[in-house]
Image (tube, rainbow, N blue to C red):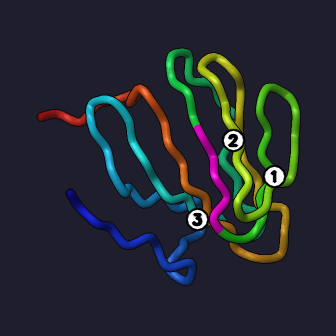
């Protein structure tokens, strides 16, 4: 078993910051940090489901053409083949726990 610290919001850079917490050949789990105005452009994963869980702040999440603002404790699921993306349209940083399975690029053993 391993334990990892999440990222410090103050360390987030000029673009969306991704901190890997865990990955295996089957999945990965990251923390995303978005300063105000930062985004993850809309995209699709043909064979991978993705979960966005807001840890702090708020973030606009788009899944399948529907857009909603999520706050801490709320979750969005983007099933395989469905477009999705993020935008921090608030005036404060946001952090999200992001899980994807199966792993799109499994780590080399």
At a point 77% along the width and 46% down the height, the residue shown is 61
Side of 19 where 64 appears, left or right = right
Rendered image quadrant of residue 43: top right
Write down the residue under mark 1: 60
Q: CB atoms at circles 3 and 1 under 8 Å apart?
A: no
Query: How many neighbours does mark 2 have within 10 angstroms: few (below 14), some (14-19), or many (20 or more)?
Result: few
Region rendered in magenta? 51-55
**Residue 102 at what x, y percent from top left?**
41, 26
First in sequence: mark 1 vs mark 2: 2
First in sequence: mark 2 vs mark 3: 3
Q: Main secondary structure of the magenta part?
A: strand
Side of 12 where 91 appears, left or right = right
**Residue 32 at what x, y percent from top left?**
55, 58
Q: Nearer the viewer, residue 104 or 22?
A: 22
Element type where label 2 sits in the image: strand
Write down the residue under mark 3: 33
Query: How many neighbours does mark 1 have within 10 angstroms: few (below 14), some (14-19), or many (20 or more)?
Result: some
Seen in the picture, residue 92 relative to 60 is either above or below; the reply is: below
Write down the residue under mark 2: 41
Element type where label 3 sits in the image: strand
First in sequence: mark 3 vs mark 1: 3
Element type where label 1 sits in the image: strand
Side of 36 where 21 appears, left or right = left
Seen in the picture, residue 72 relative to 8 is either above or below; the reply is: above
At a point 56% along the width and 78% down the height, the residue shown is 9
Query: How many neighbours does mark 3 have within 10 angstroms: few (below 14), some (14-19), or many (20 or more)?
Result: many
At a point 72% along the width and 48% down the height, the residue shown is 86
**Residue 55 at what x, y percent from top left?**
63, 65
Seen in the picture, residue 94 relative to 22 is either above or below; the reply is: below
Instruction: Look at the image and say whether residue 35 sits in the magenta stretch.
Output: no
């Amino acid at each position: 078993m391993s334990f990892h610290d999440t990222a410090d919001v103050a360390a987030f850079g000029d673009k969306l910051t991704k901190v890997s917490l865990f990955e295996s050949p089957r999945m990965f789990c990251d923390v995303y940090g978005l300063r105000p105005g930062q985004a993850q452009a809309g995209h699709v994963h043909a064979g991978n489901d993705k979960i966005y869980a807001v840890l702090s702040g708020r973030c606009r999440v788009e899944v399948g053409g529907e857009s909603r603002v999520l706050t801490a404790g709320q979750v969005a699921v983007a099933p395989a083949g469905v477009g999705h993306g993020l935008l921090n349209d608030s005036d404060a940083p946001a952090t999200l726990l992001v899980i994807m399975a199966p792993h799109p690029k499994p780590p080399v053993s």
